[in-house]
Each structure stands twice: as C-alpha cells, then as structure tokens.
Image (tube, helix red, strand yellow):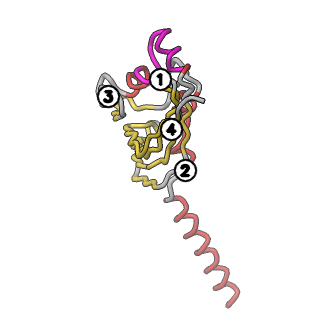
C-alpha cells in the first residue's frame, strides 16, 4: 500500500512537471522568425525570406520614416534597410553589417500571442567608420496556422560608438 501511494505521488509530480513545462514558452519556436530575419540581414539578402512577418506587421526603427505599418509593413521596412535597387543593395552589402542577438531576456506567451525582448548588437561601416550599436529588440509575435510570425518589432538602441578607420 505504501509503495502504491509513493508511485502515485511520483506519477502526479511527473505529470505536474509536464504541465508546468507545457506552459513555458518554446524559445526556439519564438526565435525562428527573428533568426531568419537576422540571417537575411547578415547576408544582405535582396528579398525578405518568407515566414517572418504577419501581413499587418508594425515596425519601429531608428531611420526615417521610423514607422512602418499597414501597407508599409515589415516587407517595406526590410527593403528600406537593405535597399531595393542594385545601387542601394550594393551600398548595404558594402556596410558589412553584422547583427547578432542573444537569448531573450524576457518572454511571455498568452495563447496565440507572444512578447519577448532580445539583447542585440549591430556592427556596420558608415562613412569609413565601424559603428557598434547595442540594443534591446522588442518583438511581438502571433501564431498563424501553427507558425510564429513577427507582428511587430522595435529596435531600441541603447548605445552607439564609432571606431575610426585603421
């Protein structure tokens, strides 16, 4: 009888542990669209890869016009960032941009919506100087047909330093 009670208690604890883990956010699933975006930027890809943004994504960033929403959503923002003509694409590639992110500092999932904060660094060359930015990249996501997509993001620069050319 004592063995049965012990086994029942162990089973209940294991089951409760599985339930608790099921409520925790799946960080790799949440990070997937952000990582695809980071990879595209780092490779200066002309076209934004599929499965990153919702159709109505909102983007805030540190270059004009600073806000992309509605018809000028994530896809338009990406074009403004990396360029849309052979010359502007070449200019972006010449910047040798390198964006990197760490694991989320904070993540919350409620149903089909998610929010997380990524520490980020962005290094690029501008006017002959190497620029180093640190930032907090805030993202909201929506689960669309079983896939997490970025519904909004804001890249908040915390610091920026320039290194003169060697």
Gap between marks 3 and 4, in whole Å? 24 Å
Q: Which mark is residue 132?
A: 4
Question: Label 4 neighbourhood size at 10 Å, few (<14), some (14-19), many (20+)?
Answer: some
In the rendered view, tell whether residue 48 sits above or below residue 38. above
Q: Nearer the viewer, residue 25 or 130?
A: 130
Gap between marks 2 and 4, in whole Å? 19 Å
Question: Label 2 neighbourhood size at 10 Å, few (<14), some (14-19), many (20+)?
Answer: some
Q: Which of 133 and 34 is in front in this view?
A: 133
Question: Where's residue 146, x and y in %?
Answer: 49, 39
- Please report whichever mark, 1 or 3, sits nearer to the chain's N-terminal start: 3
SS at mark 3 in the image: strand
Q: Residue 103 carries which label?
A: 2
Q: What stretch is highlighted in magenta?
A: 80-93
Left or right side of 15 for 148: left
Residue at x 34%, y 30% (from the top left corner): 56
Residue at x 44%, y 44% (from the top left corner): 135
Asked whether the beta carbons under mark 4 and mark 1 sit within 8 Å of each other, the answer is no
Left or right side of 21 for 139: left
Question: Where's residue 133, x and y in %?
Answer: 47, 40
In the rendered image, the residue lying farthest to the top is 86
Residue that badge 3 annotates = 68
Asked whether the beta carbons under mark 2 and mark 1 sit within 8 Å of each other, the answer is no
Foreground mark, 3 or 4?
A: 4
In the rendered view, tell whether residue 143 sits above or below residue 43. below
Is residue 28 covered in magenta? no
Gap between marks 4 and 1, in whole Å? 13 Å
Q: Quadrant of the N terminus?
A: bottom right
Residue at x 39%, y 53% (from the top left corner): 110
Residue that badge 1 annotates = 127
């Amino acid at each position: 009888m004592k063995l049965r009670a012990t086994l029942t208690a162990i089973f209940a604890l294991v089951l409760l542990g599985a339930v608790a883990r099921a409520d925790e956010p799946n960080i790799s699933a949440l990070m997937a669209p952000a990582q695809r975006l980071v990879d595209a930027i780092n490779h200066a890809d002309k076209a934004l890869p599929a499965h990153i943004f919702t159709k109505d994504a909102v983007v805030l960033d540190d270059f004009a016009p600073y806000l992309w929403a509605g018809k000028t959503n994530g896809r338009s923002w990406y074009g403004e960032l990396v360029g849309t003509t052979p010359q502007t694409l070449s200019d972006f590639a010449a910047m040798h941009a390198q964006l990197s992110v760490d694991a989320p500092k904070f993540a919350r999932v409620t149903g089909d919506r998610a929010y997380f904060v990524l520490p980020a660094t962005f290094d690029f060359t501008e006017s002959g100087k190497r620029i180093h930015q640190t930032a907090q990249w805030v993202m909201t996501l929506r689960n669309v047909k079983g896939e997490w997509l970025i519904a909004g993001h804001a890249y908040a620069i915390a610091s920026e330093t320039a290194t003169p050319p060697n």
